[in-house]
Amino acid sequence: MSNRAFHCLALSLLAFAACPQNGHAAPYTVEEVPLSQISDDLASGKTTAVAVTKAYIDRIKRYDGKLHSVINIAPDALGQAAASDQRRKAGHPIGPLDGVPIILKDNIDAVGVPTTAGSYALADNLPLKDAEVTRRLRAAGAVILGKANMSQWAGLRTTKGFGGSTTGGTAHNPYDLTKSPAGSSSGPGIVAAASLAAGAVGSDTTGSIIGPSNVNGVVGLRPTMGLVSRAGIVPISSVQDTAGPMGRTVTDVAMLLKVMAGSNTADPVTRQADAHKTNYVTGLKKDALKGVRIGVLRGFGGYNSTTSPVFDAALKVLQSQGAQIVEIPVNLFETLGREGQLVEMYDFKPDLEAYLKKAPSSVKTRTLAQLIAFERTEPHEKLHSNDRQEAAEAVSRDTDPAYAQIVAFARKRAGEDGFGKAIKDYHVTALVLPAGAPASTIEPDESSKLRTLVVPSGGKFVHEKSNMPPAFSGLAALSGYPELVVPSGFAGKLPVGMAFIGMPWSEGTLLAYGYAYEQASHARKPPTSYKQ
């Protein structure tokens, strides 16, 4: 079965889902309608969950053939919506997300739809249990509309270039179909940008939410490590992985985070979440920037002659809203790209195998070695290299003392001695910088040169200084600090964003700053190229 045949088979379930028993609600227009407005319209009776869900399904059927952002739609999506309408009719709505359609990245478990992580190795992975973030969304009444495409295995496949997945194909940027939507949360970024769902949930290991938010012109949040549970999500690295919300507005992201955040015994890193989570929506104020000191970082990856004019204009908006801008030298930070890649290499095998151990019996691939063997023979998978997986198979975090050294060094250098030091020493409450360069042109798979990552020898790790500019998303991933991307304008016809970084558990502050900036700048403009 080809990748697009897989896609079409999943979408064919819509014929069943759109049966007459789902009612005859009046059509509802969803394009560029914020999640918050949909929530209000459902609460007021202006529309129904069935009408909203059907509108998104119709948009997916109409536009996603060019975008390749949605892998499958839940066969019970309209049934979930009908149940929400019945709750409202009975006077028992659950809350603001009741009846609101949300799409999940295809590495997040949801009962009723496969979790493939973009690979045919998991084509039969029908989870027996929801991921914790999925459970929380369902408990809040959200309609789990389906699964979004992604970079296969969230990028942990090959260094030779493979931007899409075998189950979903190559995804395309809705602002320019020849451009990349970035990864690995490419699908959720496109879904949010092109109004294919009210909101989306992505995952981030080293910029996997930040990059797609930047190039697709949407809001994305990588939360503090431990605020959102990773239980039931196909992993890359337990040191760096987290899930996070993506949407068209800061308010929408805040509404999603309010539901997603919380402690979960299945993921011990979340033990402090309940003590730190808050109502992220009520904290959104238009005057949140008044009188605050914001640190400005230039010289990171993504800051160049193309993005600097957009960034300078965004800084003027911050100042117009009462913020004091404080320049912070970039030489406070080190490039930790090698450390981040080594952590992923050491973590991937044990973390993936822990997930596969709990997968249903229909999944025959249970170890990384079996996955590599499958990829070397399966017709769709053997077209791509798997050198990153081979490297992960060859190391052991349990027996190599260098692993603990790398993690300890990287966490401290990126966090306490990096972002934390900059925030404290310069007496600022957050840092801002360009979220990245505009979208790049989609390159053919396997077109990059094979890169070799050298593993520490003799169990000893030595940090090697690099002349490359530091990547802030990698530093945030290693530090566990939160980062928020908000659209800030356009470089030519392509969107770019501004990133806000804060101390751990400062999501409420970052969202408030992002909201104040968003309301003053109105920088986001919707894509149109995908409709042509």
Image (spheres, helix red, strand yellow):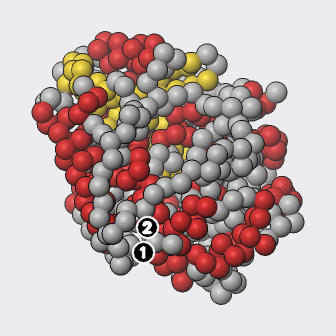
Mark 2, secondary structure of its residue: helix
Q: Residue at x 58, y 75 (%)?
A: 368
The image shows residue 511 at horizontal and vertical percentages of 35, 38
Residue type, label 1: Ser
Mark 1, secondary structure of its residue: loop
* Quarter of the image with the C terminus in it: top right
Q: Which residue is mark 2?
A: 346
Q: Residue at x 52, y 39 (%)?
A: 211
* Quarter of the image with the N terminus in it: bottom right
The image shows residue 83 at horizontal and vertical percentages of 63, 64
* Proximity of marks 2 and 1: CB atoms separated by less than 8 Å: yes
- Taking the image as shown, residue 520 lies to the left or right of residue 214, namely left
Instruction: Determine the image quadrant of residue 86.
Output: bottom right
Residue 46 against residue 71 in the figure, above or below: above
- Taking the image as shown, residue 198 lies to the left or right of residue 467, namely right
Mark 1 Cα-neighbour bin, 10 Å: few <14, some 14–19, many ≥20: some
Instruction: Determine the image quadrant of residue 154.
Output: bottom right
How far is disc 2 from disc 1 in space, using C-alphas?
A: 6 Å
Q: Which residue is mark 1?
A: 396
Q: How many marks?
A: 2
Front one among 25 and 371: 371
